Image (cartoon, helix red, strand yellow):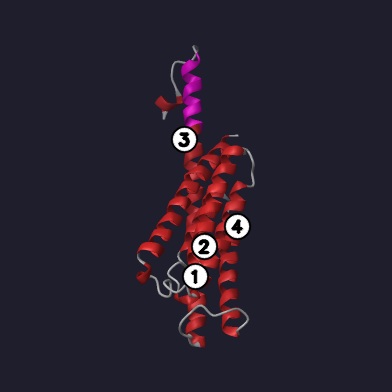
Amino acid sequence: MDKSFATREWLEWLTRVRLLTITLILSVGVVWPQYVPGLSSNRFFLPLIIFWLTLGIIHLILLRWLPLARWHGGLQVTADVLMVSLLVYSTGLQESYFISLYLLVIIVASILFSQRIAYLTAASSFLLLAGMTALAYAGKIPRTFSSLATTEGLRTWLVMNLLGFLAVAYLASLLAQSLRKKAWSSKRSARNCSVCRISPRTSFTPCEVA
């Protein structure tokens, strides 16, 4: 019960952070489009961000409406991976400035879930990125980038992204596990101290012995 309550608190906080991030992206795209290559001529950017913002608001409403449901975290992470992929594709794939948003989604998955799910999120993000790039270079989907990269440069770019995704998943999972252990040990110590203090037959508390 404590674990589900802590997860719900994380979800509420992360949902607000996500809405703030999407709002900042929208502000940059509308107010300073010249800082994002190809954004001024991209007709999909604004509808995509508005749709993502709408999804974030719907997720927040669902979290308040069904607070005990366990599918909130998985739904949000899956939606974010898909929306970030669409945003990266619409802004030029390897030329996009929004590839780093994948790292934020992987960090969120590391906080909410186990290390295995964090690696799965990192792998899914890379497969989507690599798949869209391969399809664009093969001419199966429209190209959104302005210049073609060499095969060696494209391979290096993909490998660097894969290593970055996996490294972030590993480090974020280690940090999340460490924080969880410290939180549980603190709660256990607090409970032991409170039990000993309310017992009239004890002359000391575990806190004092420690």
Front label number (4 vs 2): 2
Which quarter of the figure has residue 65? top right
Instruction: Give the amino acid type for the residue marked by disc 4 in the picture.
Output: Thr
From the viewer's perspective, is 72 left or right of 23? right
Q: Main secondary structure of the magenta part?
A: helix
Q: Position of residue 153 (x, y in %)?
A: 47, 84
Measuring 56% from the left and 42% from the top, which residue is drawn there? 61
Measuring 51% from the left and 77% from the top, which residue is drawn there? 144
Residue marked by disc 3:
186
Residue marked by disc 1:
43
Mark 4 / mark 2, whichever is N-terminal: 2
Residue marked by disc 2:
47
Image disc number at residue 78: 4
**What secondary structure is found at the residue carrying circle 3?**
helix
Mark 1 / mark 4, whichever is N-terminal: 1
Q: Position of residue 158 (x, y in %)?
A: 52, 76
Cα gap from disc 2 to disc 1, whole angstroms: 8 Å
Q: Position of residue 56 (x, y in %)?
A: 53, 51
Closer to the camera in the image, 74 or 203: 74
**Is residue 189 highlighted in magenta?**
yes
**What secondary structure is found at the residue carrying circle 4?**
helix
- Res. 53 visible in picture: yes
Q: Which residue is outermost to the top?
A: 200
Mark 3 / mark 4, whichever is N-terminal: 4
Mark 2 / mark 3, whichever is N-terminal: 2
Q: Which range of residues does the magenta coloring cover?
A: 188-199
Front label number (2 vs 3): 2
Instruction: Give the amino acid type for the residue marked by disc 1 in the picture.
Output: Arg
